[in-house]
Each structure stands twice: as C-alpha cells, then as structure tokens.
Amino acid sequence: NLSTKLDRAFKTLKGQGSITEINVASTVKEIRRALVDADVNYKVAKEVTDKIKDEAMGREVLTAVSPGQLMVKIVYDELTQLMGGEKQDIVIKGEPAVVLLSGLQGSGKTTFAGKLASFIKKQNRTVLLVAADVYRPAAIDQLKVLGEQIGVEVYSEVENKNPVQIAQNAIQFAKQNNKKVVIIDTAGRLAVDEEMMREIEQVKRAINPSETLFVVDSMTGQDAVNTAKSFNERINFDGVVLTKLDGDARGGAALSIRAVVEKPIKFISTGEKMEALDLFYPDRMAQRILGMGDVISLVERAQQQFDEEEAKRINQKIRKNQFNFDDFLSQLEQIKKMGNLKDLVGMIPGMGKAMKDVEIDDDAFKPIEAIIRSMTPQERANPDLLNGSRRKRIAAGSGQGIQQVNNLMKQFDEMRKMMRTMNKMSQTKGGMLQMA
Ligand code: GDP
Ligand code: MG
C-alpha cells in the first residue's frame, strides 16, 4: 500500500535535525519506489520526485516542523499539482447538453451513467439516459434498472443497431420532452480495438457533446494509463472518471493519467450505490494517497445523505398531519444551510405563503428560532398545547413580544391547514403532493 510505503520513506527523515542532500536523496528514492509500486508510471514518478527533491533542497527547515513533516508537505503539494491542482467541473452546455461516456467494457460506464444522472437530477435538471450499447441486450436492461432506481427516464431502441442514430434520435427525443441533459452510455470492448474506436469517434462527431468523459477502472493500474492514451488520441476526451476507487485500488492511476494524457480527472466513483460519486479534488486525492484519508469527501457525502433522510422524514410527517415545531425548526436549519428561501417554498406546502412578510436573510429567522427554542419539548411536539399562559411564558423567555408569538402561531396554524388540505387533495385526486 502506497501510504505505508511513503510512511516508511518519511520515517527515514524523522528525528533528523535537518533536510540534507543525503537524507533527501534516499527519501526521494523511496518515495519514487513507492509511487512506482502503486502503479504510477515510471516517467511520471521520476518527474515528480525530481521536483520534490529540488523543492526540499531549496527549503530552510523551520524549527517548528520536523524535516519529515516538511517533506510530507512538499510531497503533498507536488502530488496535488501533478493531479491538476484545482478541481475541474464537468461542462454541461447546450440545448440539450450532451455528455458522452467512453471506456472499455467493465470499466463502470453504465454504473457511472446512473450516478451522474442522479447527481445532475439533484441539481434540479431534467436528465435523459441513453442506452447506446448495441451489442449486449442486457446493457439496455441494466441501464433501465438504474434509471428506475433513481427516477430518470431511459431512452433505448431495441431493434436499432446503429449507435450514431440512437444517439441522434435520443437528442431529438430530449428536445421534444424537455430534457436538459442527455447522458449517452456507449458500448465498450475488453481491449482497445479499431471497431470500438471508430464507433465512439463517429458518435462523438455526429452529436458534438459538450463533455466527453473517459471512464476507467482504477484497479487496472498501468493498463489504465495506456487505455487512456489510446482513447485520448482518437476522441480527444475532456475529462476522466476514475471508478472502483473503493476496495483495494491504489491511487497510482489518478496520478499518472493526469500527467500522461493532460486531461483532468473530474469524478471518482467508489462503489455500486448510486450516491457513491464524488467530484475529484486533486488536493484531497493527494491526502488520500498520503494516507490522511479522504475525510472531506466523506463528510460531504454524509451530510447529503442526512439531508435526504431528513426531507423524507418530514415529508412523512406532513402526510400524516403530524408536522410540529421540531420539524419547523429542522426545516429552518436546512433552509439556512441552503441559504435560499425560495427552495423552501417547494419543500413545505403553505410555508411560502405563511412567510411572505419575512425578509430573506438568516437574521430573519432568529426571532422565530428564539420563540421555538423557548418552547418545552412537549410544546414543540404538540403545538396544540400552546394556550395563552404558555404563550406568555414563551414570549418572556424568548425576548419577543406576545404579538410575535401569536403571529408565529397563526402562521404555523395556516401552514398546517394548508398541509391538511393538500393531503386531502392528494388522497382524492391521487398524487398531487409530490415532494422529495
Ligand atoms: P461498463 O461495462 O463500462 O458499462 O461497466 P458497468 O457499469 O457495467 O460496471 C462493471 C462492473 O463494475 C459492475 O459489476 C459494476 O457493479 C461494477 N462497478 C462499477 N463502478 C464501480 C465502483 O465504483 N466500485 C465498485 N466496487 N464496483 C463498480
Ligand atoms: Mg455498460
């Protein structure tokens, strides 16, 4: 494992008073070996370690940092640079925007297609998935299963064996059906071959995508780099998707692909769940390679999942007419995080109306929050408890006037009334209430 090897390399430096030519040389050699062992292309490993060496030799060692720590920092910076420095976003442009996926069979194209669709859908853009793998009938079914799972429509033509036509027809279909982003999943082969290349080239020329992504299995090591090179020479893709970075994958592919093909890695995929997609941050990957763990991505994903579960939970309570002040408070928190009151209007029926007089900034919520926080847990859970004397106590406790408390109560009642009405409507008319 690269991290442990690098660790060992750094240990050589630990306890030593300064970075000298001798200890840098031996450390750098170990780092290079560790990188090569982790599937980093030799030429790339040599280039980056030469840079690390120059960098290290030029530094005065600050007393506060050990030479080992300084070395880690230098290596971290260089690895980050090697992987492109800055995060690079996918380009989604056009009416509709078209994203074309390429890569070998088994690289994870179809799985990624689903993940990307789900990712884009979460940004409130309509997506169409297109099955343009004409060789395996099962490929269409696989995409359809994923589409169903994430609630995204899948376009396919069972009889048509021409991927160029399918792609073109799909784009027509997207225009007619108001889909803003089209993701085209193509066929791959087990190895680079002329027919596959010609096909993907033709599809690309015919549809002119705003983004062509090359999907590659990071477990394939050096082969990943060679495959990336072949694809790039033929279709000049815009970015790379590294899949299967869960499991035992070594980070080497990430390091060399960027350096060899000079195209940014844009996404990493780390599992078969539809949420297991992350934007690629060179600095975080460098951290991960150095064994610091990809903490930031983990935290972000946990947060996203939490938000989704919370939305589902509140949705349930609204349906059961059990929405209370705890839920209200939780919604306020969410809104503050989103930083946009408009998002809220779509989320809770009636709330937009109830809050129409409220200024749209975080401070506007403070009196409301103060009032709710001054309620006892029982009162929050059961707003009907709030009689006159309780309201008076809450007003005093929150530093708000009794008028404000009464206003909030009135708004809250209106909201609940609205929710009830909508629930009734959805029960009678069937599915009017569509949220989350
Ligand atoms: P395609 O042939 O390029 O379309 O590849 P698929 O999307 O069908 O994926 C091939 C296999 O790899 C399937 O069994 C997927 O479930 C699996 N797979 C895809 N992406 C990932 C990933 O990020 N992590 C793991 N562990 N498996 C993946
Ligand atoms: Mg596939």
Image (cartoon, rainbow, N blue to C red):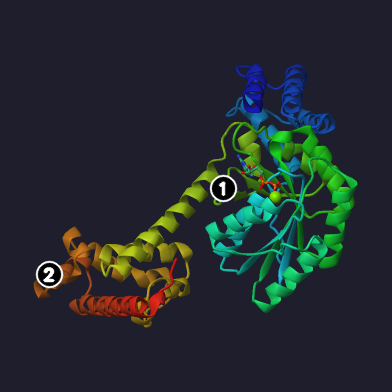
Q: Residue at x 36, y 65 (%)?
A: 315
Which of pointers 1 and 2 lies earlier in the amino acid sequence?
1
Residue 94 visible here: no
- Residue beneath disc 1: 276
Amino acid type at mark 2: Arg
Give the CA separation, mark 1 to mark 2: 47 Å
- Residue 390's tag is 2
Element class at badge 2: helix
Residue 356 versus residue 263 in the image, above or below: below
Amino acid type at mark 1: Ala
Please provide percent x and percent y for residue 406: 20, 78
Residue 181 versus residue 425 in the image, above or below: above
Q: In screen coordinates, is 347 left or right of 239?
A: left
Give the position of the N terminus as an image quadrant.
Answer: top right
- How many numbered marks, from 0 up? 2
**In which image quadrant can residue 334 be found?**
bottom left
Q: Residue at x 45, y 62 (%)?
A: 337
**Mark 1 CB in 8 Å range of ligand 1?**
yes
Please provide percent x and percent y for residue 146: 58, 55
**In which image quadrant can residue 381 be found?**
bottom left
User: Which of these two is toward me, 359 or 316?
Assistant: 316
- Residue 69's tag is none
Please provide percent x and percent y for residue 69: 62, 28
